């Protein structure tokens, strides 16, 4: 019964109304006659309404868990897509991608919950959208930092090669080879990961401080993306009206 309510068929916005009094038919079990209710404009018999209410009351946890699972997957996909596009465009981040991330997270969560929404879903969708967009700054920064590091390393190797060439020409002993970098401990890696996460989550505000104009615009677009996720995660309403008496057919 829950699937009948949440799936696109039947759709509450296009409910089939009875043409004559007394000819009403429940849109869920197709039974006729008697008192009836309207569930989001769809005609329903008392038995189906009671079953919908009991199932929704008993099954509140599972749809939310599925929605969160789908939402996290969508947020990760949005983060990766945001970072890849920024890297391919060599740092020219299109802030409007925040809108797409918000839409992706909201739609994925409603797909996981079969249309069940509400305030907990909206809060989760907003947090996931913000996290996906802000944390995209981490892989972007790491990529460009590594690029600059490789350039410095290439320049350093070139300088060392020139130095060794001069030492060979003047008969001097070659300089000692540089010592290998010490291995990094797990604790240090954990601290670095925590610092990166903090920088990522605060990156929209750091951008405002570094570039007030562009940063404020990016923050505004991010807010709109969060708003999109919020509205989608509201889900389809479950409103029951009635009961109504089914009038007898005209003679």
Image (tube, helix red, strand yellow):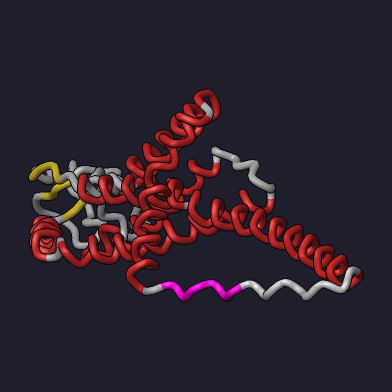
Give the percent coordinates (x, y) of residue 131. 38, 50
Q: Which residues are magenta?
A: 179-184
Q: Is residue 146 shown above or below 12?
A: below
Closer to the camera in the image, 222 or 170: 170
Task: Specify the quadrant of the image occupied by residue 59.
Answer: bottom left
Q: Is residue 229 left or right of residue 209?
A: left
Q: Total number of numbered labels?
A: 0
Task: Specify the quadrant of the image occupied by residue 159.
Answer: bottom right
Give the percent coordinates (x, y) of residue 2. 22, 64
Query: What secondary structure is the stretch in magenta mostly built from?
Result: loop
Q: Is residue 104 left or right of residue 167?
A: left
Closer to the camera in the image, 32 or 70: 70
Q: Residue at x 33, y 45 (%)?
A: 126
Q: Is residue 164 shown above or below 17?
A: below
Quick one: quadrant of the N terminus? bottom left
Closer to the camera in the image, 117 or 197: 197
Q: In the rendered image, is residue 28 in sight?
A: yes
Q: Residue at x 12, y 46 (%)?
A: 246
Q: Residue at x 39, y 61 (%)?
A: 193
Q: Is residue 10 left or right of residue 212?
A: left
Q: Is residue 231 shown above or below 108?
A: above
Q: Residue at x 14, y 48 (%)?
A: 37
Give the percent coordinates (x, y) of residue 238. 20, 48
Quick one: quadrant of the C terminus? top left
Instruction: Name the residue at the front extreme.
Output: 171
Closer to the camera in the image, 178 or 105: 178
């Amino acid at each position: 019964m829950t699937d009948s309510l949440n799936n696109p068929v039947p759709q509450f916005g296009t409910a089939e109304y009875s043409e004559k009094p007394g000819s009403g038919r429940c849109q869920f079990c197709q039974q006729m006659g008697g008192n009836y209710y309207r569930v989001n404009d769809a005609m329903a018999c008392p038995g189906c309404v009671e079953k919908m209410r009991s199932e929704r009351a008993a099954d509140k946890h599972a749809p939310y868990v599925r929605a969160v699972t789908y939402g996290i997957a969508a947020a990760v996909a949005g983060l990766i897509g945001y970072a890849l596009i920024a890297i391919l465009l060599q740092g020219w981040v299109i802030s409007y991608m925040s809108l797409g991330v918000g839409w992706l997270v909201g739609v994925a969560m409603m797909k996981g919950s079969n249309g069940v929404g509400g305030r907990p879903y909206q809060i989760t969708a907003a947090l996931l959208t913000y996290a996906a967009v802000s944390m995209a700054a981490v892989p972007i920064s790491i990529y460009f930092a590594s690029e600059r590091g490789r350039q410095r390393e290439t320049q350093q190797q070139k300088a060392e090669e020139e130095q060794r060439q001069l030492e060979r020409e003047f008969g001097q002993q070659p300089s000692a080879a540089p010592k290998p970098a010490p291995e990094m401990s797990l604790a240090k890696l954990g601290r670095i990961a925590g610092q990166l996460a903090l920088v990522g989550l605060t990156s929209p505000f750091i951008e405002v401080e570094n570039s007030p104009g562009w940063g404020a615009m990016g923050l505004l677009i991010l807010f709109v993306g969060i708003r999109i996720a919020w509205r989608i995660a509201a889900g389809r309403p479950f409103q029951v009206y009635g009961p109504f008496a089914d009038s007898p057919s005209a003679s």
